[in-house]
Amino acid sequence: MKPLLAAWRGRPRRDTGQGRAIFVLASALLLTAIAALLSWRVAEARHEAAVVAAVEADLARLDRRMTSSVALLRATRSFVLAEGDAITPRAFGLFVGGLRIRSDFPGIQGLAWSPRVGQGDTYRIELIEPMDERNRAALGYDMHSDPVRAAAMDRSRDSGRFSVTGSVVLKQEIDAHKSPGFLVYTPLYERGGVPQTLEERRRLLRGFVYAPFRAVDFFEGVFEPGVVRLHAVHTQSDGEPPQVLHGSEEALARPVATRRIDFGGQAWLLLYAPGTGRDWTDWVTPAGVLLAGLLVSVLLYQLTRTQVHARRRAELRSSQLGRQVQFSQLLVGIVSHDLRNPLNVIQLNAALLERAGLRDEFARCVQRIQSSTAMSLRLIRDLLDFTQARLGSGLPVVRTPGDIVEIVQQAADAARLAHPARRIEVDAHGDGAGTWDADRMAQVVGNLLNNALVYGDPDSPIHVSVHAEHSRVRIAVHNAGDPIPPALREALFEPLQQGESTAGRSGRNIGLGLYIVRQIARAHGGEVQCRSTRDEGTTFTVDLPRAEGAASV
């Protein structure tokens, strides 16, 4: 209160002027930098999540393709086992032909049977289908003569599981330009199944059912371009340098993602490069925050300077005018700070006392404290809403799904609690579901009820009705009493306008309630009307659409 007394005594405090404007500018720029940084970090986190999702989707497709290929080899192994030594090229060809491997299994060059020759480590390709020019070039080849193939074959033989080679040049590559590939082996033992011991697995091995794959065909369709793109697939083997199995041979300085996966004992390293580009919102949002913050900072700086200069010019006028200006400014500060904050503290402590189990007479005192505090806070809220509606572009509303009937009931319950001696009746017709700003709609009903309590007949009930029809909802608050003069009805919705109170309580409001009701209704796309006659009483009707942009009916 000391600044207020100083204003009345004609002793305005000195203002630092330019220093205050610079402080406001520096504070706004700091907040802008923090907001832009947070926005950028959110965009980075969103991009990283998109990268992880894209890579995981690629890995899932790759796993499904390899799993289906291994299942195909196991089925072929079962056929070879069932045929035994009587297997013929014709029977093998008919079996493989029915599998449609070229159309249903991308990258596979064929299915082959390579039996063991004697008891040594010689495995010549005896059967391979489909029998085309490329596969014919592989017939009779001893695969164990190649160290890369031999390592995978030995691993498959000793484990009894399928095994994948490193990067090799297939015998099917008969053109001048040779593409990398790999082979997948499954072992076939005497009597089927997998022998228990390592010595038995090595002794009872009959040969291998295997499939050669061209890497470029196998990986086609697995890696979809998006936020990332596959740069290369490298094979990794113990003691061996990585080799490019698929993709670019150029080194990638900083891959955006890497994944190491293992198929049949062979490790593949997947390297990802940036894809088609980041979502434009990743750049626009932080830049927009930064630009908006800079603009607001400059505006605040200019506004502060303007206010300081205006104050200085006002102080040069007559002392009386200067005191009035300073008093008005300090009064706004009191409303927004010196009154609102203590009232919030009073309300909080009253709520704590209410839960303390006081005696009835003290409990009633606490209720009166809460009621008076709530009324004072409503007055302050009305002042702030009035300022926002006048100086801004209307009151903001945040629509969320809700039931308007429940909102009306809660507002009526609050009014009954504050005015236990008055009767407030509520009836509803139809479904009240829609999208509204629940707090603002409760404020509408509360203001209309407060208006009816102040200006209506205290001995008659107040009737609240909700009618929900099609795409619109009507809320009506009716009270008995003297009618509102026709000339005053429209003016009631202007600020600082009020009629005569039959209960002598008009001084408890400042004439902003109905103005705020209209502003909230219009913010919802609706309107408020008043009908008042001596016989029917006074009815305020709020007509609203159920949802934003709903058509009128």
Image (cartoon, rainbow, N blue to C red):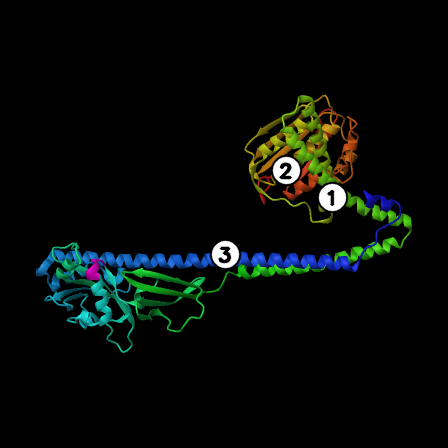
The stretch of residues the image draws in magenta is 156-161
Q: Distance between the residues labelled 3 and 2?
A: 36 Å
Residue 522: image location, x then y, percent: 66, 42
Q: Residue at x 69, y 24 (%)?
A: 362
| SS at circle 3 | helix
Residue 455 falls inside the magenta stretch: no
* Residue 141 position (above or below residue 301): below
440 horizontally vs 390: left or right: left
For residue 246, the mark is none
Query: Which of 341/378 is in front?
Result: 341
State whether residue 44 appears in this view: yes
Identify the residue position indicated by label 3 in the image.
46
Task: Establish if 551 lies above or below 30.
Answer: above
Evaluate if marks 3 and 2 touch, with contact meaning CB atoms under 8 Å apart: no
Residue at numbered disc 1: 337
Of all residues shown, which one is farthest toward the left?
86
Q: What residue type is labelled 3?
A: Arg
**What residue is pinned by disc 2?**
441
How crowded pointer 1 is (Cα within 10 Å; few <14, some 14-19, many 20+) is rated as few
Residue placed at 55% from the left, 31% from the top?
Answer: 430
Question: Mark 2 against mark 1, which lies toward the viewer?
Answer: 1
Q: In which quarter of the image is the N terminus?
A: top right
Q: Nearer the viewer, mark 1 or mark 3?
A: 1
Q: Position of residue 95 (x, y in %)?
A: 16, 59
